[in-house]
Amino acid sequence: MLGQILVTKQTGPQGKVVSKVYLCEKLSLVNEMYFAITLDRNTAGPLIIACSKGGTSIEDLAEKYPDMIIKVPIDVSKGITDEDAAKVVDGLAPKVADRNDSIEQVKKLYKLFCESDCTLLEINPLAETSSNQLVAADAKLNFDDNAAFRQKQIFSLRDPSQEDPREVAAAKADLNYIGLDGEIGCMVNGAGLAMDIIKLHGGTPANFLDVGGNASEGR
């Protein structure tokens, strides 16, 4: 597998070169659930999403089990409360793990989310083992690039070979750039509006590039 091209939904059709393979302990799982913390614009704060079914994408879960997904917004001024964590655990509905221990696990995950400047913490599956433990059997974390200055240890793990080379080059030039799969390049003030106009007229943007806000005479 090392050195080969791996194609997934996340990589796009071009795939990514496999540079590392992680070996993990084999677990005996008796139940799989879904757990995530993300940032929600509607509530202007963290949002915990939980489902008693797991092991597949949240999109598939939402399609198959929409009534089983619960969402618990967290007040950033108060932080996560025991009541918030209990709602999440009730949504997860663990079968063998201790309820109070599970509540503490949820609170610890929220603490990790905040202290690490995450924009996403997704555990899928959050699983119960045959020894009645609640474990993160698989996890995905995204971090706020703006927090790189205080999360030096986390960002030291960054592997540019796994990123879009266009975005790596743009970041070195201090440009706010995201590569897309369209055919029309954008370099505008107000990139979102420009991209909407392109789509309105039947085109597809090749990139997001917003030069507003940090443009200077020298640049």
Image (tube, grey):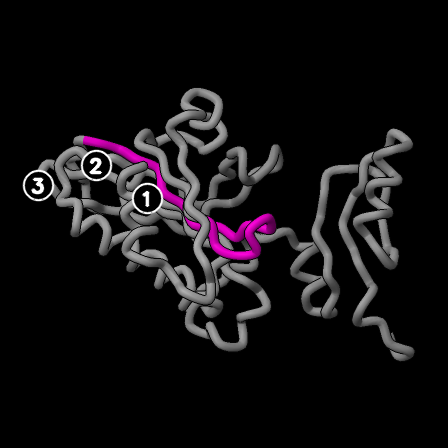
Residue 131: mark: 3
In which quadrant is the N terminus drawn? top left
Residue drawn at x 17%, y 31% is 30
**x, y percent for residue 19:** 45, 51
Residue 88: mark: 1
- Local secondary structure at mark 1: helix
Residue drawn at x 55%, y 55% is 161
What residue is shown with label 2? Answer: 94
Q: Can residue 19 be seen in this view?
A: no
In the picture, measured across the screen, residue 143 lies left or right of residue 99, that is right
**x, y percent for residue 168:** 65, 60
Q: Nearer the viewer, residue 128 or 96?
A: 96
Q: Quadrant of residue 187?
A: bottom right
Q: Quadrant of residue 196?
A: top right
What span is in magenta?
31-47
- Local secondary structure at mark 2: loop
In the picture, measured across the screen, residue 215 lies left or right of residue 127, that is right
Q: Residues within 10 Å of mark 1 (few under 14, many from 20)?
A: many
Looking at the image, tell me whether mark 3 or mark 1 is earlier in sequence order. 1
